[in-house]
Image (spheres, rainbow, N blue to C red):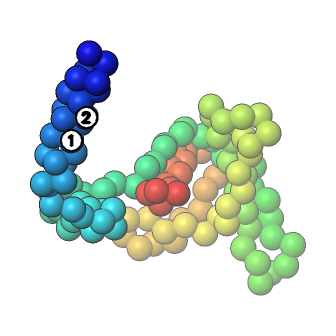
Amino acid sequence: MKKNAKNEFNEETFASVKKEMAKPRMAKSARLGKLNLDTARIPEQPTVTMPGTVAKIIPSPRPSQPEKAQIAVDGADHKYRNLRIENTLTDEHGDDVRLKKGAPVEVTVTAEPGR
């Protein structure tokens, strides 16, 4: 009886393997390439936006270097709360603008997908 039960299991397994092998084979890189070509599936970059406030303006040590703005990011860990950037920004019209102390700002961090 054990021999018959073993043969039935093997026949079921063989049928499922045959069914799987009947499907067309495609490499993983080809599947990913096919997904990237799909126009309905547009990959978006992962982003996060956090509110912050300009804590202080740091004057430049030399005239050739721009001044910096220190931004306190709300909701960040205490160790990583302060962020310093150059205080030479451009608005939507292409005009140069500068941040002032106490100004509310939004900080957006963008990462490349898959990294």
Real-space Cα distance between discs 1 and 2? 6 Å
Which residue is disc 1 drawn over? Answer: 14
Residue situated in front as seen by the camera: 39 or 74 = 39
Is residue 102 visible in the rendered structure shown here? no
Q: Residue at x 37, y 65 (%)?
A: 92
Q: Is residue 112 left or right of residue 79?
A: left
Q: Which residue is mark 2?
A: 10
- Report x, y in % for residue 85: 67, 61
Q: Are marks 1 and 2 in contact (CB under 8 Å)?
A: yes
Residue 83 appearing in the image? yes
Residue 39 rendering spot, x and y as whole percentages: 15, 62
Name which quarter of the figure residue 80 lies in.
Answer: top right
Q: Is residue 105 above or below residue 25?
A: above
- Name the kind of residue labelled 1 in the image: Phe
In the image, farthest residue toward the bottom: 64
The residue lying toward the viewer, choosing from 83 and 66, is 83
Left or right? Give the position of 20 relative to 33: left
Which quarter of the figure is the N terminus placed in? Answer: top left
Q: Position of residue 101 (x, y in %)?
A: 68, 47
Q: Secondary structure at mark 2?
A: helix
Query: Is residue 22 placed above or below 59 in the rendered structure?
Result: above
Q: Say which quarter of the image contains residue 44.
A: bottom left
Task: State which quadrant residue 104 falls in.
Answer: top right
The spot of residue 97 in percent (x, y) is 54, 65
Foreground residue among 45 and 65: 45
Secondary structure of the residue carrying numbered label 1: helix
Q: Residues within 10 Å of mark 2 (few under 14, many from 20)?
A: few
**Residue positioned 14% across, 46% down in the render:** 19
Residue placed farthest to the top in the image? 1
